[in-house]
Image (cartoon, rainbow, N blue to C red):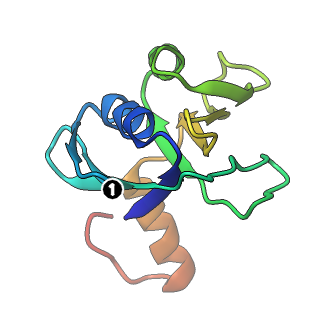
Amino acid sequence: MVVFDAADIDAESTFWASLLGGHVFEDEAFHVVFDAAGKWRIGVQLAPNHVPPDWPRGNPQQVHLDLHVDDPRTAHAEAIALGARLLRAAPDPESDEGHQVYADPAGHPFCIGWGHPSREALAKFVADQVRPGIRWPDT
């Protein structure tokens, strides 16, 4: 699980819960974000002196999430409406495959990507690269 530091944990946890279609379990200094299926996905920890990362230079050190979607236009509109900022637009947002880089309300970068290979195609690719000729489950 990824835990984000944030000065405003209410805004941060609400943003991620809304983007994932889930909900938040709140504590005074730590929030747990569940997705729509009820799985614990993200933690948000109170950090009153949080400094947002300077993307892409990485100061301070950072981590980011990649979210893969089927409908990038809807995902973009939803992320912006929830408080995300677009950091880098795709060269061609209408292309069959691509990604855009955003920042959440606390400044953590994340990507929304589309048109990527299916889980099955990736599993087959990995299986073929690691152990050619061996059939892996779900390939």
Where in the figure is residue 3, as x and y percent of width and height? 44, 60
The residue lying at 54 percent from left, 18 percent from top is: 80
Q: In this view, does 30 lie above or below 131?
A: above
Kindly indicate the quadrant of the structure image that contains residue 138. bottom left
The residue lying at 49 percent from left, 55 percent from top is: 4
| Farthest residue, direction left | 38
**Disc 1 designates what residue?**
30
Where in the figure is residue 39, as x and y percent of width and height? 19, 53
* Total count of labels: 1
Q: In this view, does 25 lie above or below 2?
A: above
Q: In this view, does 15 lie above or below 79?
A: below
Q: Is residue 34 above or below residue 94?
A: below
Comparing 126 with 63, the one in front is 63
Q: Using a 10 Å C-alpha cutoff, classify the residue at mark 1 as few (fewer than 14 neighbours), some (14 to 19) or many (20 or more).
A: many
Where in the figure is residue 29, as x and y percent of width and height? 35, 55
Comparing 129 with 89, the one in front is 89
* Left or right: residue 94 compared with residue 72: right
Q: Is mark 1 on a helix, strand or loop?
A: strand
Kindly indicate the quadrant of the structure image that contains residue 124. bottom left
The residue lying at 26 percent from left, 72 percent from top is: 137
Residue type, label 1: Phe
Q: Quadrant of the N terminus?
A: bottom left
* Left or right: residue 3 compared with residue 56: left
Comparing 10 with 4, the one in front is 10
The residue lying at 63 percent from left, 35 percent from top is: 103
Q: In which quarter of the image is the C terminus?
A: bottom left
